[in-house]
Image: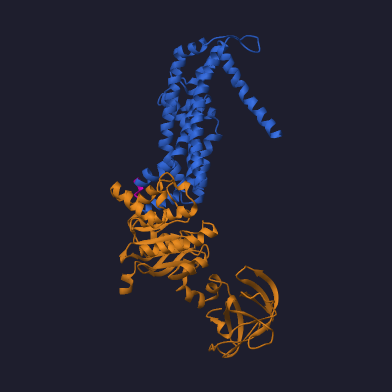
Chain colours: A blue, B orange
């Protein structure tokens, strides 16, 4: 009974702000009242038509895409190297090292980037690539965590030993066994990376140039304007994040089901 | 030399030490004939899995030679050795169907698809899983998964079959049934096989030949009967089967003074007054009324366990203890140690 109460309270706490956002986005006027008055969809049309929001949306997608690609390209070999490391100590140390960015405030990273990349020798501050570079540092730990954990759960080492004994070469093992066996966790990891990148504000706000601002950065500006407009703009971001979360949940669920049945 | 070239698997002086440790395997000599099933048995950490990994090529020996069908493969990579390996955890590919798992060795050997399917199907029939070829491993029971692993390890006609504790992940009932299955399939393929286990029942019931391993060395090799009836030392006697080990002082050529009393033994040839160690298997000891003949001792029951078919009793006789295994239901007042049940162990 108590548990049910706590759960319900938590759900209310979780849902109310989001529900208010929705209500606000359809409200015509929302000044000193508890709830807005009137019904309209023009805030959505306004956001969709706003050139700076359109550009920010595209920038965000581009950064997220680059970040995901790079995370896969860097993260997979890295995860594999950490997993296959012979010595227990090397594994432990690398584990701490790759988890470090989680503890590092994005702000600290951003200051470092601003210092280094505003110089004349490296004048790249504000470019999409630099944004993505920061996002890679911030999101890679989550990708690695998902993939390394899956490697351990699967007993990937024994699977590879088996493949090798059956005559499979290194390249064949990678494409026949490693990649397909890990596909669920790779997908789930990438979706987490995409969701984090899409919603990242701290770092992006300092490092993004005027032309390449990401969606959350532009969103902050919206709150200085009409409430309905800001709400509608937020709902767009929310929808994107929700989509990523649902896809991630499905992928992870699929992986767990296979694992559970296998065990 | 001719015997060696006839063996399918031959190890000579094989030594491997794990870097930075003192453990490994040392100076292993072992031959497995075509069609023979050799079981390597030993406590955990004795190096038996290391031995298997050396033959499979996952480890390279520091010294010695490993030959498969006469060819020295010591420095060849695993995939060139053509050994079928069955792992304790099955190691089936979770994303492939049963038949794809079995056909995988053929796929990497570029066998055409139609033939892959046909040969996988044949192997699945041999292991008794022909109806389940389209399932995923996760949809099979442990015993079924191990059959798939066996089929996969045999489908490419390997030079040897290596089984690393293949039955230890199964529940007790399935394990005994799978024992017979492994034996039947191994016989049907007539392939030289090495099975690693720490289960002495498994070793005794499956093997053509047993090798007992301890601390990285082979301490005894022989048929199951030889290992059980004539263990070389107390370690083997204790590890394979249960054993009563008695320290004794020689009185004369056919009498030894032991903690349980003075024992009449077969002639042993040890000097009067020397210390020797005797072995008596629990099932060879009989229940008897006290003081009714040679080697009969008064016994007090310490522990009496009933297992249905047998009964395991621990008794105190004299100043010693004996384990007795018997089918008799009678109350215990004394035990009889038949003279011909007494063996002498070499070392102390």
On screen, residue B243 above or below B102: below
- Coordinates of residue B43 in the picture (x, y in percent): 53, 65
Pick whichever, A161 or B35, lies toward us.
Answer: B35
Does residue A239 appear in the picture of this structure? yes
Residue under the point 41% across and 50% down: B131
Q: How many marks?
A: 0
**Which quadrant is the N terminus of chain A positioned in?**
top right
As for residue A48 lying within the magenta part, the answer is no
Image: magenta residue range:
A167-171
Instruction: Please name the predominant secondary structure of the magenta segment in the image.
Output: loop
- Coordinates of residue B254 in the picture (x, y in percent): 57, 90
- Coordinates of residue A124 in the picture (x, y in percent): 41, 24
Pick whichever, B18 or A49, lies toward us.
Answer: A49
Residue under the point 50% across and 44% down: A259
Residue under the point 41% across and 32% down: A69
- Coordinates of residue A177 in the picture (x, y in percent): 40, 45
Pick whichever, A172 or A100, lies toward us.
Answer: A172
């Amino acid at each position: 009974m108590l548990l049910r109460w706590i759960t319900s309270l938590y759900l209310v706490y979780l849902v109310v702000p989001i529900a208010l956002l929705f209500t606000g986005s359809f409200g015509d006027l929302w000044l000193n009242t508890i709830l807005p008055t009137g019904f309209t969809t023009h805030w959505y049309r306004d956001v969709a038509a706003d050139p700076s929001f359109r550009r920010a949306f595209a920038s965000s997608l581009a950064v997220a895409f680059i970040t995901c690609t790079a995370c896969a390209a860097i993260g997979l070999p890295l995860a594999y190297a950490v997993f296959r490391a012979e010595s227990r100590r090397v594994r432990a140390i690398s584990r701490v090292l790759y988890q470090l960015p989680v503890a590092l405030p994005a702000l600290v990273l951003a200051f470092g980037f601003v210092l280094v990349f505003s110089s004349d020798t490296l004048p790249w501050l504000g470019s999409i690539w630099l944004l993505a570079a920061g996002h890679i540092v911030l999101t890679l730990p989550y990708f690695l965590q998902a993939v390394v954990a899956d490697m351990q759960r699967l007993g990937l080492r024994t699977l590879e030993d088996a493949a090798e004994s059956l005559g499979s070469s290194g390249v064949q093992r990678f494409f026949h066994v490693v990649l397909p066996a890990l596909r669920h966790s790779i997908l789930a990891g990438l979706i987490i990376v995409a969701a984090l990148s899409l919603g990242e504000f701290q770092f992006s706000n300092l490092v993004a140039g005027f032309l390449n601002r990401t969606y959350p950065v532009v969103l902050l500006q919206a709150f200085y304007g009409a409430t309905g407009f800001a709400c509608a703009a937020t709902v767009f971001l929310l929808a994107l994040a929700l989509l990523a979360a649902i896809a991630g949940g499905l992928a992870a669920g699929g992986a767990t089901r296979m694992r559970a049945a296998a065990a | 030399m001719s015997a060696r070239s006839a063996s399918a698997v031959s190890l000579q002086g094989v030594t491997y030490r794990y870097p930075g440790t003192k453990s490994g395997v040392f100076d292993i000599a072992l031959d497995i004939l075509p069609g023979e099933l050799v079981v390597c048995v030993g406590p955990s950490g004795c190096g038996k899995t290391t031995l298997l990994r050396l033959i499979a090529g996952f480890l390279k020996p520091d010294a010695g030679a490993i030959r498969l069908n006469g060819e020295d493969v010591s420095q060849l990579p695993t995939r060139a050795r053509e050994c079928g390996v069955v792992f304790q955890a099955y190691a089936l590919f979770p994303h492939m169907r049963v038949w794809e798992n079995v056909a995988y060795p053929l796929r990497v050997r570029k066998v055409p698809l139609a033939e892959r399917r046909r040969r996988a199907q044949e192997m699945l029939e041999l292991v008794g899983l022909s109806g389940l070829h389209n399932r995923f491993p996760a949809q099979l029971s442990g015993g079924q998964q191990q059959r798939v692993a066996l089929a996969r390890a045999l489908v490419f006609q390997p030079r040897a079959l290596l089984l690393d504790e293949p039955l230890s992940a199964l529940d007790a009932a399935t394990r005994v049934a799978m024992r017979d299955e492994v034996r039947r399939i191994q016989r049907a393929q007539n392939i030289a096989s090495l099975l690693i286990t720490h289960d002495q029942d498994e070793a005794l019931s499956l093997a053509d030949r047993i090798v007992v391993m301890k601390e990285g060395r082979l301490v005894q090799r022989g048929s199951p009967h030889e290992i059980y009836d004539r263990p070389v030392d107390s370690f083997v006697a204790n590890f394979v089967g249960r054993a009563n080990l008695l320290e004794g002082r020689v009185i004369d050529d056919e009498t030894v003074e032991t903690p349980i009393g003075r024992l009449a033994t077969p002639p042993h040839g040890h000097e009067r007054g020397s210390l020797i160690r005797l072995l008596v298997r629990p099932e060879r000891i009989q229940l008897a009324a006290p003081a009714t003949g040679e080697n009969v001792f008064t016994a007090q029951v310490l522990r009496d366990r009933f297992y249905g078919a047998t009964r395991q009793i621990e008794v105190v006789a004299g100043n010693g203890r004996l384990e007795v295994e018997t089918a008799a239901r009678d109350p215990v007042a004394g035990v009889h140690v038949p003279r011909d049940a007494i063996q002498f162990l070499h070392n102390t």
